Image (cartoon, helix red, strand yellow):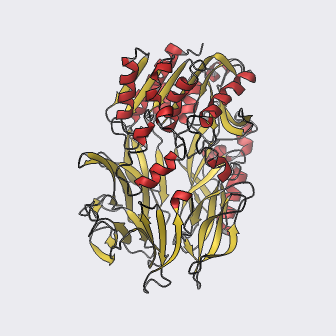
Amino acid sequence: MFRFLIAVILLAVSPTALAQDGAGADGGPPVAKPTAAKVLEPLSTATFARLPFLEMAELSPNGQSVAGVFAIKGEPRIGIIPVGKDISQTVFVGVPDLTEVDWIQWVGDDNIVVGLRALVPVEGDNWYISRLISVSRTTGKATRLLWDLNGQDAASIVWVSTDGSREILVAGQASVYVGDGFWPAVYRVDVATGRKKTEINGRASVMNWGADHLGRVRYGIGYRDQTTQATLIYRGDGKAAFRSIDRASLRDDEQLSIPFVFVPGTDHGLVYAEAPDGRSVIAEVDLPTGKQVRIAHQVEGADIEGAIRSPDGSRLIGFYTSDDAKPVQWIDPAMAAHQKELDAASPQSRVRIQSYSKDLSKLLVRISTPENPGLYYFYDAASGALSKLAEVNEAIGNKRLSRSKFVRYKARDGLEIEGVLTMPRGRAATNLPFIVMPHGGPWSHDTLTYDYWAQFLAERGYAVLQPNFRGSTGYGDKFLKAGQGQMGFAMQDDVTDGVRWAVAEGIADPKRVCIVGASYGGYAAMWGIAKDPDQYRCAVSIAGVANLRRDVNDFGNSFRAKLYRGQWQKMTPDFAAVSPINAVGRIKTPLLLVHGKKDVTVDHIQSVKMHGAMAKAGKSVEFVSIPLADHYFSREADRMTLLTAIETFLAKHNPPD
């Protein structure tokens, strides 16, 4: 068992301490036992607007440093900090202008590589581009990698060395024009100097490359958007000629058997596959023949949503699942033992191993609950010590906020829908002002985890329902495909039926219901007040899509534009018929639009045009355009503007008291 170093750590993870300190039988981060008056005192808007102290956290291979996106004076900064008290080697660099951070990965113990993306004007249109930078832990220097290439994608990591060298393999396009340079080559890059040499030349129609854990390029993925046909080319040893081994019609939802782990001593690979009942599983496949050898891993009643490889990429050590009770399952005995001990130390909290050292002996751990954003800890298995690193939100600290739980209700056609219900603390659980908040995507789902928007709204006195309507991920292929043809129809009805369920249960006051959402959820908010104009008292659309016809034809000049367009076209038979901008005349309730001008996911023009259409029709509409905000409101000032706008609007049109 752990030897706890400091009292605060013991309080944070000991179930006995939790019960004594007011956290209750269901555990979670510790909560100082408050007086009755303090329980009802609402937290400020600024508290919820604070950026998480750390996101995209990655532990260095030696376990001595943490890299991530840190909140520094309200701004996101790419940073590297040492584990421990010596902060002399702390490094912070700004996120390059007009870009968003996609991911961070260590290369050895002294460098990280950072994936960036942006939406930039090219020949009169907006194009998505991706780029790489590296940051040195020892010098603090940021180096651009492959920025001399002039293609859209120059940031596809193929392989990262784990032997201490500074080399990576990166696939990148040299041109945006079909011909020489358009098809990505694979480059061997020194992340410290930026020097490169060509490893594999570009090959017609091949847009993606993959390597084994030894850095041998073993496969390529070909694709032709005219036919939406994908091809897998493969070679067994990284030296022989490539040959085609698999084909798939992506338009028809077929999948290539793309290996993410190669089985040593064989031509077998681990791939994602579909079980007969539609669940996502991991299978072992004979790559040259395409024959399935066995289903290697599966979860009863749930999907496998992602693989977790060993630090050197040579083997599978665990996987992510859609089972909220057990979202991570470890195959590696050491990692399974670590998880078991951590879970036992805080049995009613969500204990998530975020990252780990090369030898799996040092872990970066986040302990949280749906009612608290949690804390980061560093665990050293050799000593058994668990050390607190930081609170995710220092302004919240260890306070327990509003309780959340899963609920289930029946849609009008009998389909069972699951959602997350958050009930405002300090209020009676009946006849409450109500917010329904559909998620973005739409191919995603809400989970029973801390959500700062839901908690902010609950703190203001609203009950909040986050419905996982049909078409959401995490409930199997049948549920996912139930959304096809139903965007704006049954998908929207599932949201409305959640409101009606809450009214029938006595939770929601039917006269005080608003709908709030972002991205696809913003679309659902606008469409909700058009489709069911008498259901809602008001609506808030954050970075929402007002014109589906525009959205499905705007993929930043993506190479797979036809495929993506086809996927959207499967979702509804008539884009115009379910686009909010074409239904302004049916809207009766006030609408708030919030959108960042630096959004590279949903174009700011979507809200501009919706605002114009509403104003022209004499409808009640407000528009908050935030000059420096991106799709995720990555700056604290922008989050403050967003939450203040929502709070003011709701207080005016659907006051909680």
- Image point 35% across, 49% down: which residue? 556
- Image point 61% across, 23% down: which residue? 462
x and y percentages locating residue 43 in the rendered image:
54, 25
- Image point 28% across, 76% down: which residue? 197
Question: Is 611 left, or right, of 356 in this rendering?
Answer: left
x and y percentages locating residue 653 in the rendered image:
52, 14
Determine the image quadrant of residue 203: bottom left
Question: Is 431 left, or right, of 171 in this rendering?
Answer: right
The quarter of the rendered structure image containing the C terminus is top right
Can residue 289 be seen here? yes
x and y percentages locating residue 82 in the rendered image:
44, 57
Q: Is residue 417 above or below residue 281?
A: above
x and y percentages locating residue 138 in the rendered image:
33, 62
Q: Is residue 367 above or below residue 429?
A: below
Q: Please tell me how many numbered marks the rendered image carries.
A: 0
Question: Is 440 left, or right, of 601 in this rendering?
Answer: right
The quarter of the rendered structure image containing the N terminus is bottom right
Can residue 109 be seen here? no
